Amino acid sequence: MAKGFAMISTNFPLAIIFLIGILIPIIAMRRSNEQVCENSIQLENDCGRYCFRIVKPVLDHTRVLQRQVEGCNMNEKSEFISKFEQIERLLLEKFDAFEEAMTNMVESLSDMRPFQKIGAKYYFIENQLPLSWFDAAERCRLMGAHLASPQNKFEYDALKANLHKTYYWLDINSLAKNGEFTSATTGEKAKFLQWQRGEPNNVKDNEKCVILPGWPGNHMNDEDCKKTFYFVCEKGRHMLKAH
């Protein structure tokens, strides 16, 4: 009997300590993701409710077992110890599920943060750092995206309405063959082109990349790929976790 009480006095506090040890990383995770959650009051509430919903039933069951363990015989106490061990395993499983859900949520929000939804696509419009066409394409690639490539007039007009009065690189170019404008993303002929009057003119046989002016009434123009302009990165919904 003394041995049975020793087992309970040893294992039960360990179970409680284990529960506290599990909750501390959850709180730490909540604080580390505070900047993301505070962007949306609703999201912050959802984080709290999700954690509470997962952990509370396990804690309630633990308190019930704690009350029942007093006055039990040796066999019953051994059964309770086994149940505590099951709770530990269950809590670990719940915590792993919670951690995975939180990680996916944070990654998704972080992935979307620089991009704005315009029509059915997501765009990052760079208005601070002008780059060459090649550097702009690489910058978009590092963001898990590509230089924008409007596929029809609807996408073209929607994107253009969100641009400042300056110039932006698109992914369209004629680097492979003069006069044949293709998408750097697909390698295929550009599906939509709307040129400014008199363009493309390939001045000095040195204008191989396409810019889009932000001014109303102005349209695509071919330019020297080495010149620096702002740019637009694009990704579809299916690409948000691709990188």
Image: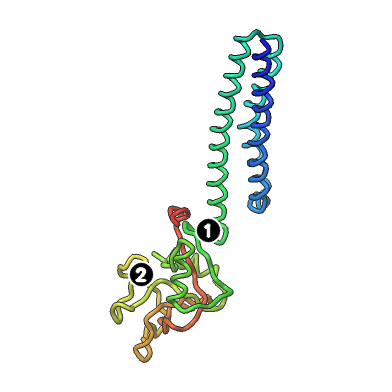
Quarter holding the C terminus is bottom left
User: Which residue is painted at 56% across and 61% down in the image?
Assistant: 114
Q: Looking at this view, name the residue that lies furthest to the left.
A: 177
Quarter holding the N terminus is top right
Report if the CB atoms under discs 1 and 2 are less than 8 Å apart. no
How many other residues sit within 10 Å of disc 2, few (<14), some (14-19) or many (≥20)?
many
Decide which of 222, 20 is in the foreground and name it: 20
State the residue position of label 2.
183
Horizontal arrangement in the rendering, residue 121 relative to residue 203 (left or right) = right
User: Which residue is painted at 71% across and 16% down in the image?
Assistant: 67
Identified by mark 1, the residue type is Lys
How many other residues sit within 10 Å of disc 1, few (<14), some (14-19) or many (≥20)?
some
State the residue position of label 1.
117
**Which circle's residue, 1 or 2, is located before the other in the chain?**
1
- x, y percentage for residue 65? 66, 18
Give me the C-alpha separation between circle 1 and circle 2. 21 Å
Identified by mark 2, the residue type is Ser
Total number of numbered discs in the rendering: 2
Q: Quadrant of residue 68?
A: top right
In the picture, the disc for residue 89 is none
- In front: label 1 or label 2: 2
Q: Quadrant of residue 8?
A: top right
Decide which of 198, 111 is in the foreground and name it: 111
- x, y percentage for residue 118? 51, 60
User: Which residue is painted at 44% across and 70% down in the image?
Assistant: 138
Q: Is residue 26 above or below residue 180?
A: above
